[in-house]
Image: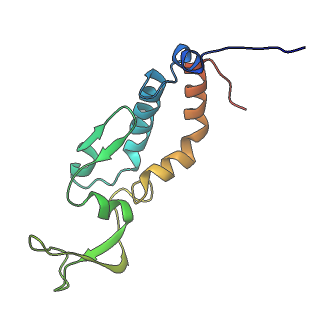
């Protein structure tokens, strides 16, 4: 006996809000941005307050964002932390110290995820009608 079952997977995903850049993706991104906030380095708030949230990304902007994320002191060829326009910095091998540490610091997305993964997964599952195992 042959059984044929036709279904539209995209329609099922849309009904659950799981299409690319759909409501569940946007909710997930916004929840991550909100929970990441206390982990982002902050001395005067420049990095923390210059983020762009898209449907599937969170981008921290600024010339120093990548250095703050990596957590290593970057130096100009003359050994200064300040580089002239066009100069490339190199890794000094010395870790940065952060105001508000140990909560605020490098790789804030990974540390936030380690602390809040279960809660975020619960919210996502609830939003699309699923359950967390």
Q: Classify residue 89 as left or right of residue 121.
A: left
The quadrant of the image that shows the N terminus is top right
Q: Nearer the viewer, residue 45 or 127?
A: 127
| Residue 96 place in picture, x, y as percent | 34, 70
**Which residue occupies the extreme front position in the image?**
1
| Residue 63 place in picture, x, y as percent | 20, 59
**Which residue occupies the extreme left position in the image?**
85
Write the residue at 27% across / 74% down: 74
What is the quadrant of residue 6 in the picture? Answer: top right
Q: Classify residue 35 as left or right of residue 9.
A: left
Whether 34 is drawn above or below 67: the answer is: above
Write the residue at 36% across / 56% down: 100
Whether 10 is drawn above or below 69: the answer is: above
Number of marks: 0
The figure's colour scheme reads rainbow
What is the quadrant of residue 22 in the picture? Answer: top left
The quadrant of the image that shows the C terminus is top right
| Residue 52 place in picture, x, y as percent | 27, 39
**Which residue occupies the extreme bottom position in the image?**
78
Q: Classify residue 83 as left or right of residue 94.
A: left
Write the residue at 39% across / 54% down: 104
Q: Classify residue 70 as left or right of residue 25.
A: left
What is the quadrant of residue 106 in the picture? Answer: bottom left
| Residue 89 place in picture, x, y as percent | 23, 75
**Which residue occupies the extreme right position in the image?**
1
Write the residue at 42% across / 34% down: 29
């Amino acid at each position: 006996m042959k059984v044929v079952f036709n279904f539209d997977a995209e329609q099922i995903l849309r009904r659950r809000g799981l299409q690319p850049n759909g409501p569940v993706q946007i909710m997930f991104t916004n929840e991550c941005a909100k929970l990441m906030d206390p982990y982002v380095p902050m001395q005067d708030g420049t990095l923390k307050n210059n983020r762009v949230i898209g449907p599937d990304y969170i981008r921290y902007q600024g010339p120093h964002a990548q250095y703050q994320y990596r957590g290593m002191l970057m130096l100009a060829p003359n050994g200064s932390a300040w580089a002239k326009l066009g100069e490339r910095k190199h890794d000094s091998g010395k870790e940065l110290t952060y105001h508000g540490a140990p909560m605020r610091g490098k790789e804030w997305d990974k540390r936030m995820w380690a602390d809040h993964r279960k809660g975020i997964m619960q919210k996502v599952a609830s939003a699309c009608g699923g359950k967390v195992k």
